[in-house]
Amino acid sequence: MIKGYAALLIIDVQVGSFKEERMLYKGIELLKNIQLLIHKARTVQAPIFYMKFNGKTGSLLEHGNPEWAIHESVAPLSEDIVLEKNHPDSFHETSLQQELNKRDIEHIVITGVQSEICIDATCRRAYSLGYDVTLVEDGHSTYDTTLLSASQIIKHHNDIIGEWFADLKKAQIIEF
């Protein structure tokens, strides 16, 4: 059980990240884990925040493109808070901190895309701002690179973030 008021933060789970030609590592499993987290949060009326990345003009995640939409399998309801961002850090130049503070949120459960970019930046910033942070160990993903496989990147970030910036927990055991 999480102490204090908690919120679920779903980062950049947008249609464009789940295209067959460039599918996220274990993308279907990621969506199922996020669905489980959403169900758990809704059951206890914990607030759910969605971050949407505004890609550059002409990119897959350009604002307004069909691929820019939040993935339909984890789509927000009217009571959820949807914020847009232009940077990897979900707090940078957004109203996320103000929205969390308005609701007296002390603990943030973080899930989404991309492990080494937006997940990393947001976990570190949330920690620096004084929030208790849980990173969903099986609730973030990325792509293979020329240097590392996606599974190596995820493991590395779980190790680093879990050492300093967040508690690591699997989706199945998280309770709000």
Image: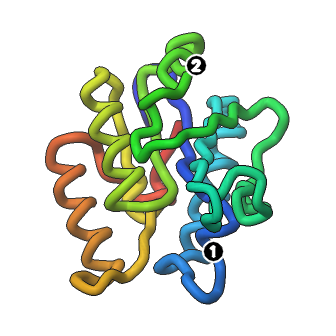
Quarter of image, res 133: top left
The residue at 65%/69% (across/down) is 16
The residue at 53%/15% (across/down) is 98
Tell me the distance, in whole angstroms, between the alpha carbons under discs 2 and 1: 28 Å
How many callouts does the rendering have? Answer: 2
Residue 8's spot in the image, x, y percent? 55, 39
Q: Is residue 4 above or below residue 42?
A: above
Label number found at residue 18: 1
Q: Is residue 110 left or right of residue 8?
A: left
User: The residue tagged with tag 1: helix, strand or loop?
Assistant: helix
Quarter of image, res 22: bottom right
The reply to whether the C-beta atoms of the residues labelled 2 and 1 are less than 8 Å apart is: no
Q: Is residue 81 above or below residue 74?
A: above
Q: Is residue 6 visible?
A: yes
User: The residue tagged with tag 2: helix, strand or loop?
Assistant: helix
Identity of the residue furthest to the front in this view: 57
Residue 140's spot in the image, x, y percent? 45, 62
Q: Is residue 32 visible?
A: no
- Which quadrant holds the N terminus? top left
Nearest the viewer among 117 and 48 is 117
Q: Is residue 29 above or below residue 38?
A: below
Residue type for callout 1: Phe
Residue type for callout 2: Glu
Nearest the viewer among 90 and 27 is 90
Which residue, given by chain and number where applicable, does mark 2 sit on?
A: 99
Q: How is the image coloured?
A: rainbow
The residue at 43%/61% (across/down) is 114
Sequence-earlier tag: 2 or 1 = 1
Q: Is residue 83 left or right of residue 138?
A: right
The residue at 35%/78% (across/down) is 150
